Amino acid sequence: MANLRDVARRAGVDPSTASRVLRGDPTQQVRPETRERILSAARELAYRPNALARGLRTRRTDTIGLIIPSLDNLGFADVTHGIQAEAAAAGRLVMVVDAGAAAAPGGDPEGVAAAAYERLIGDGRLDGLIVAFATLDDRQVARLAAQGVPLVLVNRRTIGVHGSVVVDDARGIGLAVEHLAGLGHRRIGLVGLDADTDTARRRVKGYRTAMAAAGLPVEERWSAADEPTVEGGRRAADRLLAGPRRNRPTGLVVASLMSAVGVLAALRDAGIRVPEQLSVVAFNDHPFADHTAPPLTTVRMPNRRMGEEAVRMLVAALQGAPVGDVVVPEPPELVTRRSTAPPPG
């Protein structure tokens, strides 16, 4: 790999002159032909500035951190893709920390996330953070924000911290309820997120609001909450199936795609046919939903856009712009597959 001295040697100039020209120093006065000679030499040698040396000078690493609960969550895939793409377009690298995977067996992922905040920022490895792990009242994140650490929350909001990008979760869940009600379902249940996050609360609120708008009753025995995992979906479905058959819901809105996969497995094990006996709609979409049995009807959220907006906000914050709390205006979209049908009977 060519270095600065190689470029200077080919251009016939001093390395300090080549350095100032290549970094666009406005105080460097050189003749146009000398400048072009330096730039041509850099192109011919495929010269790239030394990021470490530049970082020492600018006190920037051009790297942002992304801390997420788990890479296993398919619902977060598009968010991550949006973050990576927008960061690349802005000339930034992304360092991803999977707090769930980094935790020891039986350990505390939130503790891992807290340690990651401290190390990545305290050691000067990152310019800022995108955080997808914040709880409703996250004191660790609030403390970092109070210290002036540049950070943006994605798919989350937390008390006392400004700088967030979310989608309209309530509208997305409402779209699922409206779909089932439109098919004729009257007993519609919810498999929610067992998490102390505003995301979980917004999805529950969307369910209750849509049920009220459709004139449908909300029965507590038709709802269960658990982790947004396949195992969590299984456990929630098992609890819903524990009651008398005549009191079970005929349609389920599942607030996580991974949970919905577990719900389908639990229903199959219980001998309940989907959608002939019970319809299922999952929140968030992924090509994987085409390959479940049956293929899942989902609500597609603008998650990629959410990731892109989070990077734009963080990069602007690093340049001194104020942060805000943004709801992505792009509306959710229902993707109808074969897991929903009119209720039996």
Image: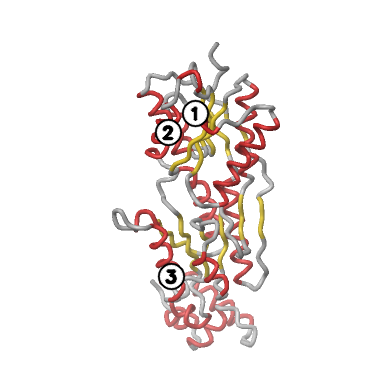
At x 57%, y 51%, the residue is 198
Q: Are marks 1 and 2 in contact (CB under 8 Å)?
A: yes
Upstream in the sequence, badge 3 or badge 2?
3
Q: Residues within 10 Å of mark 2 (few under 14, many from 20)?
A: many
Which residue is label 3 attached to? 120
Is residue 164 toward the left or the right of residue 257 in the image? right
Upstream in the sequence, badge 1 or badge 2?
2
Which residue is label 2 attached to? 261
Q: Nearer the viewer, mark 3 or mark 2?
A: 2
Under circle 2, the secondary element is: helix
Amino acid type for the residue under numbered disc 2: Val
Q: Does 183 sit above or below residue 229?
A: above
Q: Nearer the viewer, mark 1 or mark 2?
A: 2
In the picture, residue 242 is in which quadrant?
Answer: top left
At x 42%, y 79%, the residue is 6
Which residue is label 1 attached to? 296
Q: Residues within 10 Å of mark 3 (few under 14, many from 20)?
A: some
The Cα atoms of the two marked residues, 3 and 2, are separated by 34 Å
Q: Quadrant of the C terminus?
A: top right
The Cα atoms of the two marked residues, 1 and 2, are separated by 9 Å
